[in-house]
Image (spheres, helix red, strand yellow):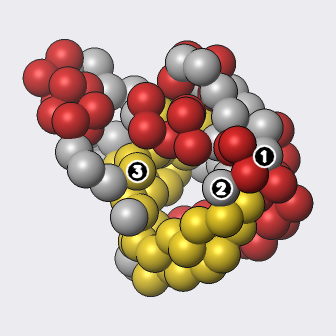
């Protein structure tokens, strides 16, 4: 999904937790920070998976996360998110951020861009 190498590198360097999901809420781009937070060694291990496959207790919130994705895609509007979950290594964390529609170069809805701190 991120074909431009410079864009990919920029996303990896940002201090936030960034990922992109397709219209089926499957991960298509994940930063190293997101992978580590959710129990994966490498971002590519998450590609094609949904929140239900996270390797931490946050997977128990998958239905809520996917409902948020659907809301963003149906309304084609950004929403604010906030929540507490237990992530990899038992880390209990408050996550706040935004979920926004993600569009293809042709302007078609491709999924959801998620940015959290």
Between 42 and 47, the one nearer to me in the picture: 42
Task: Tell me the element at label 3.
Answer: strand
Q: Is residue 76 visible?
A: no
- Taking depth in this image into account, of 59 and 19 the one nearest to the observer is 59
Camera-side residue: 10 or 78? 10
Q: Residue at x 28, y 32 (%)?
A: 12
How many discs appear?
3
Which mark identifies residue 56? 1
Measure the alpha-carbon separation of dots 1 and 3.
16 Å
Q: Secondary structure at mark 2?
A: loop
| Position above or below: 10 against 85 | above
Residue beneath disc 3:
17
What residue appears at the point 44 percent right and 82 percent down from the top-left corner?
80
Specify the farthest residue to the right: 60
Mark 2 in CB contact with mark 3 (< 8 angstroms): no
Callouts 1 and 2 close, C-beta under 8 Å: no
Sequence-wise first label, 1 or 3:
3
* Crowd band around label 2 with a 10 angstrom C-alpha radius: few (<14), some (14–19), many (20+): few
List x then y, in percent, for residue 100.
Answer: 40, 66
Residue 83: image location, x then y, percent: 62, 78
Q: Is residue 95 left or right of residue 26?
A: left
Q: Position of residue 102 (x, y in %)?
A: 39, 53
Q: Which mark is residue 91?
A: 2
C-alpha distance separating marks 2 and 3: 15 Å
Asked if residue 54 lies left or right of residue 1, the reply is right
Spot occupied by residue 67 in the image (x, y as percentages of width and height): 73, 71
Q: Could you tell me how far apart the alpha carbons at marks 1 and 2 are, in whole angstroms?
A: 9 Å
């Amino acid at each position: 999904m991120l074909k431009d190498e410079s864009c990919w590198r920029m996303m990896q360097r940002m201090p936030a937790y960034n990922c992109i999901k397709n219209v089926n809420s499957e991960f298509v781009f994940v930063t190293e920070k997101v992978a580590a937070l959710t129990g994966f060694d490498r971002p590519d291990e998450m590609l094609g998976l949904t929140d239900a496959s996270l390797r931490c207790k946050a997977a128990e919130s998958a239905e809520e996360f996917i409902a948020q994705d659907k809301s963003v895609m149906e309304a084609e509007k950004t929403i604010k998110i906030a929540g507490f979950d237990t992530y990899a290594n038992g880390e209990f964390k408050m996550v706040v951020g935004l979920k926004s529609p993600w569009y293809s170069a042709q302007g078609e809805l491709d999924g959801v861009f998620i940015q959290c701190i």
